[in-house]
């Protein structure tokens, strides 16, 4: 399918469609970023709002500082995370996402194109228009592919919920907000005071 046709369908329908692979994804030059979830194409929401960028920047800074000189590395979008089912070949991969922030502790999963396999921690920050994708579709693939910990942040409400993988299923935390300090089970020693993230956004 030509780039113009894909752009047109995304603009016209604003919905998932198709059955594509990462090899095809690499050939596209589209208007805006897209993700593949089990072969379906999802258009990214409009450019993130200021509150989203502030939360993202503060979280990335905290993680980067914590992980300095450690084995784990933190990455921010745009950064391709490929989730292979059986093969790491581009033509066999049908799920590639771009989390807002992710932490990878296994260096063998990293290559020049990004990450192949589940990161240890993924953080998604909700934006208007992408909540269904983050809450439903991404939740399902992150759980299925074994992302150890998934943080879902609502910047407008200043809330965080942490999903931790237990026996291949996510268990959700209570809703965290101002006044709370949270710790990560996937990133050893990482502790976050939420006031430092949400204050003044």
Image (tube, rainbow, N blue to C red):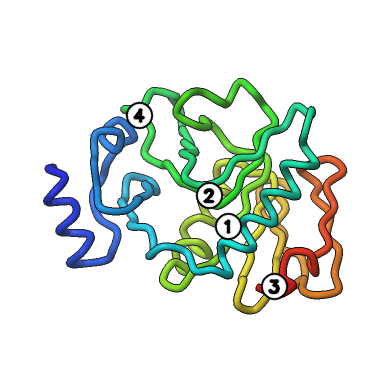
Q: Earlier in the sequence, mark 4 or mark 2?
A: 4
Q: Earlier in the sequence, mark 1 or mark 4?
A: 4
Mark 3, residue position: 159
Mark 2, residue position: 99
Tell me the SS state at disc 4. Answer: helix
Q: Are marks 4 and 2 in contact (CB under 8 Å)?
A: no
**What is the quadrant of the C terminus in the image?**
bottom right
Q: Residues within 10 Å of mark 2 (few under 14, many from 20)?
A: many
Report, in whole angstroms, how far the alpha carbon at label 4 lies from the one at label 2. 21 Å
Q: Earlier in the sequence, mark 3 or mark 4?
A: 4
Q: Which of labels 1 and 4 is toward the front?
A: 1
| Residue ID at (38%, 65%) | 46
Report, in whole angstroms, how far the alpha carbon at label 3 lies from the one at label 4. 37 Å
Q: Residues within 10 Å of mark 1 (few under 14, many from 20)?
A: many
Mark 1, residue position: 124
User: Can you say whether 87 is above or below 65 in the image?
Assistant: above
Mark 4, residue position: 92
Q: Residues within 10 Å of mark 4 (few under 14, many from 20)?
A: some
Q: Quadrant of residue 21?
A: top left
Q: Are marks 2 and 1 in contact (CB under 8 Å)?
A: yes
């Amino acid at each position: 399918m030509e780039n113009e046709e894909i752009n047109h369908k995304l603009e016209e329908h604003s919905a998932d469609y198709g059955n594509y692979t990462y090899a095809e994804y690499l050939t596209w030059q589209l208007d805006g970023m897209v993700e593949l979830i089990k072969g379906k194409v999802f258009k990214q929401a409009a450019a993130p709002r200021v509150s989203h960028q502030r939360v993202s920047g503060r979280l990335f800074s905290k993680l980067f500082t914590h992980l300095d000189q450690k084995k784990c590395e933190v990455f921010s979008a745009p950064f391709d995370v490929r989730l292979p089912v059986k093969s790491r070949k581009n033509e066999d991969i049908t799920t590639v996402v771009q989390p807002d922030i992710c932490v990878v502790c296994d260096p063998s999963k990293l290559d020049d194109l990004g990450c192949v396999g589940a990161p240890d921690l993924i953080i998604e920050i909700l934006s208007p228009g992408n909540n269904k994708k983050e809450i439903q579709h991404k939740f399902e693939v992150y759980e299925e592919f074994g992302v150890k910990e998934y943080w879902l942040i609502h910047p407008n409400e200043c809330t965080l919920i942490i999903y931790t993988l237990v026996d291949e299923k996510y268990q959700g935390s209570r809703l965290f907000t101002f006044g709370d300090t949270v710790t990560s089970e996937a990133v050893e020693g990482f502790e976050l005071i939420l006031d430092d993230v949400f204050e003044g956004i």
